[in-house]
Structure formats: C-alpha cells, structure tokens
Image (cartoon, helix red, strand yellow):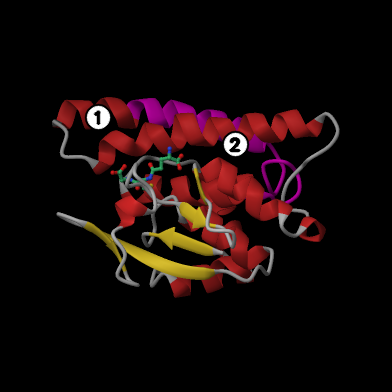
Amino acid sequence: MNLYYVPGACSLGPHIIIREAGLDAKLDKVTFGAQRTTESGKDFYTINPQGAVPALELDNGEVLTEAQVLLQYLAAQNPSANLAITEGPQRWRFLETLNFIATELHKGTGPLFKPNPDEVKEAAKANLVNRYKLLEQKLGDKDYLLGQFTVADAYAYVVLNWARLFGVPLSAKLNTYFERIRARPAVQQTLKEEGLPTS
Ligand SMILES: N[C@@H](CCC(=O)N[C@@H](CS)C(=O)NCC(=O)O)C(=O)O
C-alpha cells in the first residue's frame, strides 16, 4: 500500500490508522502548487484525478479515495486492532459519527483554507462553533466518541487540529479530548513522520 498525503491535511487520519493498526504501508508526500507532484516524482493527478489527498494505492494498483472510506478500509486490514465498529447497533452510530465529521466538520472547515472574504470565513466559523458543540455532545463523558478509540477519533483529531489553527473556540472538554488522542504513541509517531508539532 502507498498513502499519498499532505502534512496535516485530512490524510493525517488514515496515516494515524496505519500506525495504530501496525500496517505495512509506504508514504508519498504530495506538494500542492502550480502542479501537484509527489515526493517520488509522480504527477498526483494521474493517481487521483480529483487532485485531493488522501489517496491509497493498493497492492493490486487500484486507488481508493475518500477519507472516511480509507479509514474503514485500513481498520479492516487488522481487525484485531479494533479500530472500527462493524457489528451491532453501535455500528450505525459509528457510521453516523464518521459522516458527521466528514460532511459537517471536515467540509465545514473548507472555507477557512481558501482566500474567501472575511464575512464568508466568519460565517463558516460561526457554523463550526455550533457543530463542535454537537461533537462535544456526541463525546459526552466518554474518553472517545464511541467509547473505545476508533478511526472516528483519528478523523476528529484532524479537524480539531484545524479548528485550533484557525482559532475556532473549543470547549475545555474538546481540548482535553484532542490532547488525549495526541498523546497516543501511534499519533505521536505519525506527527513526527509528517514533521508536525507533537505537543
Ligand atoms: N472528498 C474527499 C476530499 C478530500 C479533501 O478535501 N482533501 C483536501 C485536503 S484535506 C485536498 O486535498 N484539497 C485539495 C483540493 O481539493 O484541491 C475526501 O473526503 O477524502
């Protein structure tokens, strides 16, 4: 397997899961500029015509995209690591949580990355404040969103990191949750591999 990533982008979630699950995968860093090239010298558009990370090249040459699908695919490569909920009524809550993170938090942060007018960015931030309150409700008094650490927490870590970077106010509980995830050895290893701050 080969994960195409940009440091700190949403590809950080699948990268964390590769380390949490102890999977054997190569990493190829993508640089976004006038062109999108990978560290190994590929034109990234030939890997993912959408031009977006994450992209996961499987050993048979197929390429999988969409962060929440990659997260589940990677979790399935080592079921004993218990990183996804695949059975029982909690499965639906797990999928609901992943979709909430993808569509409300991940995509909700999109306008902050772009050179949008200030009012557009302020509106996006106001919306995120509300959405992070909902994330806090989902967390409740648990250590992790589904009770146990799953790929949903890896994904939540990525978007919470962006929220902190862009100054979206987060409650003390969400900051503690973020730090709990960051302290995990596999997360620390991943952050080091991407050249990101570990504390
Ligand atoms: N639908 C994709 C979107 C992924 C995405 O938004 N990737 C961002 C980085 S976090 C990206 O590569 N953006 C560059 C672009 O879309 O041009 C997914 O859910 O994985």
Whole-percent x, y for residue 38 in the image: 32, 65
Whole-percent x, y for residue 65 in the image: 49, 45
Q: Which mark is residue 122?
A: 1
Specify the amino acid type for callout 2.
Leu
Instruction: Report the number of discs.
Output: 2
Q: Which residue is mark 2?
A: 98
Quadrant where the N terminus is found in the figure: bottom right
| 102 lies above or below 43 | above
Which residue corresponds to the image point at 47% horizontal and 57% vertical from the top-left? 12
Rounded to the nearest whole Å, what is the CA distance between mark 1 and mark 2?
A: 25 Å
Specify the amino acid type for callout 1.
Glu
Q: Which residues are magenta?
A: 126-151
Frontmost residue, 18 versus 157: 18
Q: Earlier in the sequence, mark 1 or mark 2?
A: 2
Frontmost residue, 25 versus 103: 25
Q: Quadrant of ligand 1?
A: top left
**CB of mark 1 near ligand 1 (< 8 Å):** no
The magenta stretch spans residue 138: yes
> Disc 1 vs disc 2: which is toward the camera?
2
